Image (spheres, grey):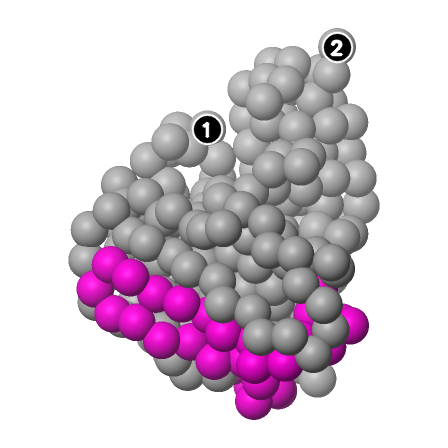
C-alpha cells in the first residue's frame, strides 16, 4: 500500500498570504495524484487531478505540481473561504489518502 | 446539474448490518462509476470500493472484502452500500462519490453526496 504523508499538519496563515502544502508518496505514483478541500460538515471537493489539472470550476489561485513521490498544492493568495482541511489522494491499488493539512487563520 | 443524494443517519448494534442508498441525477447513470469513501469522526478518508453501474462490476478494498457489498438499480439511478458484521470502529460518515472519468475508471471523485452517518453502538 502506498502511504501518503502530508506536511505540515497545520498551516497558520493570514488572508492574502500564499499557502504551499506538501504530499509525499512512499513510492512513485507518477502524476496520479489529486487534491481535495474539505470544510467542516461538508463532503470533500476535488481541486486538482493528475497532479496539476484544475477540476471544473476551481479558481486559478489553486495550482498543483509534482511527479513521482513529491507533490505540492499552492494557493497563491488565500481567500477567507480557503481555510479548510486539504487531502491528497493517489489512485494506485489500493487507493489511499493522505492524513490532511489544516489551513487555519493566523 | 449533477446531484448525489444519500439516505439519512443510521444507528446499529455491533454485529448488525446497514444498507445506505445514493441516488444520482443530472447525468447518464451508466456512464460514470461510483465510489464509497468513509470518514470516522475527526479522522481522514478511507476508500471502500467502486461499482460500475453499467454492468454492476465491483472492486472492493482488500480490508473490506467479504464485509461490504455494492449494488445498483439502473431504473432509479441509485447505488447501495451494505456493510455487515458492524463493529464500533465502523462508526463513520459514509460518502458516495462519482468517478471523474466518463466511460472509464479515473479513480478521482468529482461529485460527492452529503454523507450518511452510521453509528455503531451497543
Instruction: Give the x, y percent position of residue A93.
Output: 27, 50
Start and end of the magenta stretch? A55-84
- The answer to whether B28 is drawn above or below residue B23 in the figure is below
In depth, the one of B2 and B89 nearer the eye is: B89
Task: Say which element carries label 1.
Answer: loop
Q: Earlier in the sequence, mark 2 or mark 1?
A: 1
> Taking A16 as reference, is A93 left or right?
left
Q: How many marks?
A: 2
Task: Say which element carries label 2.
Answer: loop
Q: Identify which residue is drawn at 42% across, 60% down.
A: A22
Please rate how many residues cluster around mark 1, counting C-alpha atoms within 10 Å: few if below 14, some from 14 to 19, many from 20: few
In depth, the one of A24 and B114 nearer the eye is: A24
Question: Outermost residue, top direction?
Answer: B122
Instruction: Give the x, y percent position of residue B17.
Output: 62, 26
In depth, the one of B40 and B20 nearer the eye is: B40
Name the image quarter holding residue B22. bottom right
Residue B67 disc label: 1
Amino acid at each position: 500500500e502506498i502511504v501518503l504523508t502530508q506536511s505540515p499538519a497545520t498551516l497558520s496563515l493570514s488572508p492574502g498570504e500564499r499557502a504551499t502544502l506538501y504530499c509525499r508518496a512512499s513510492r512513485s505514483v507518477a502524476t496520479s495524484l489529486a487534491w481535495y478541500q474539505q470544510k467542516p460538515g461538508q463532503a470533500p471537493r476535488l481541486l486538482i487531478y493528475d497532479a496539476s489539472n484544475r477540476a471544473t470550476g476551481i479558481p486559478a489561485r489553486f495550482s498543483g505540481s509534482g511527479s513521482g513521490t513529491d507533490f505540492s498544492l499552492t494557493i497563491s493568495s488565500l481567500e477567507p473561504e480557503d481555510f479548510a482541511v486539504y487531502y491528497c489522494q493517489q489512485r494506485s491499488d489500493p487507493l489511499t489518502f493522505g492524513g490532511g493539512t489544516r489551513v487555519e487563520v493566523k | 446539474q449533477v446531484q448525489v443524494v444519500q439516505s439519512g443517519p443510521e444507528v446499529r448494534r455491533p454485529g448488525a448490518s446497514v444498507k445506505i442508498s445514493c441516488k444520482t441525477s443530472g447525468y447518464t447513470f451508466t456512464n460514470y462509476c461510483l465510489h464509497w469513501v468513509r470518514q470516522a469522526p475527526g479522522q481522514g478518508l478511507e476508500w471502500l470500493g467502486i461499482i460500475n453501474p453499467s454492468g454492476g462490476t465491483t472492486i472492493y478494498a482488500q480490508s473490506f472484502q467479504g464485509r461490504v457489498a455494492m449494488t445498483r438499480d439502473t431504473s432509479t439511478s441509485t447505488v447501495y452500500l451494505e456493510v455487515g458484521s458492524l463493529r464500533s470502529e465502523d462508526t463513520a460518515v459514509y460518502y458516495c462519490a462519482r468517478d471523474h472519468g466518463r466511460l472509464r475508471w479515473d479513480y478521482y471523485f468529482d461529485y460527492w453526496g452529503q454523507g450518511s452517518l452510521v453509528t455503531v453502538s451497543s
